[in-house]
Image: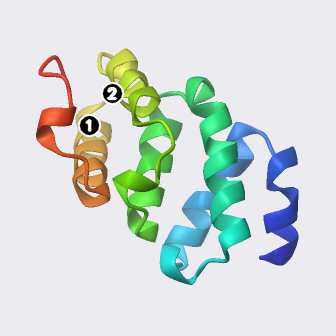
Amino acid sequence: IYHIENQMIHMDSKQIGDITWAIASMGGQWKHLSKQLKYNLLSTIDKYWNEYDNFSFASIVWSLAKLGVHWNDFTDKHVVISKLLSLREKLSPQQSSKLLWALGSLGCLYNELSVEF
């Protein structure tokens, strides 16, 4: 993990999504990750929000929820919500339910989402 932690800032959006999903799938827990890994992970994800397609976006938000990240850990929640709204027409029913579960698990409140979703 130490090698990945230091290489994250050089990874592209696909690599970051894959790494996040892998750590979550392995049972990684946010509270057990190093501060540097948490910072690098969220910073790099923040850099790529606009590059994620519907599949990648749903997977990365699910992965963050699975890790135990909290909605308040996001530096710019509005970017996440804007991305969600921009993709809403492209989301499959499975991706929509995955995202809603993930947002609820992250601690996002219903009133923070637009009624347009």
Q: Name the side, left or right, on which 13 lies relative to 93.
A: right
- Structure colour scheme: rainbow
Residue at 11% of width from left, 21% of height from top?
Answer: 115
> CA–CA distance between discs 2 and 1?
6 Å
Say above or below: 90 vs 105.
above
Circle 2 SS class = loop
Q: Nearer the viewer, residue 43 or 26?
A: 43
Q: Earlier in the sequence, mark 2 or mark 1?
A: 2
Marks 2/1 in contact by CB < 8 Å: the verdict is: yes
Residue at figure coordinates x 65%, y 33% from the top left? 48
- The image quadrant where one finds the C terminus is top left
Location of residue 52 in the rendering, given as x and y in whole percent from the top left corner:
57, 30
Q: Position of residue 28 (x, y in %)?
A: 53, 78
Rendered position, 107 above or below 58 = below
What SS does tag 1 mark? helix
Toward the viewer: 34 or 89? 34
Tell me which corner region of the image, top left, top right, bottom left or bottom right, holds residue 14.
Answer: top right
Position of 102 with respect to 29 (left or right) is: left
Note whether 26 is above or below 52 in the view shown.
below
Q: Which residue is found at the position 42% from the left and 42% from the top?
A: 58
Q: What residue sits 69% from the left and 50% below the top?
A: 16
Q: Which residue is mark 2?
A: 91
The N terminus, quarter of image: bottom right
What residue is pinned by disc 1? 96
Q: Amino acid at mark 1?
A: Ser
Task: Name the spot of residue 32 as percent of width and height, x first.
Answer: 56, 83
Camera sees residue 57? yes
Amino acid bearing label 2: Leu
Q: Quadrant of residue 18?
A: bottom right
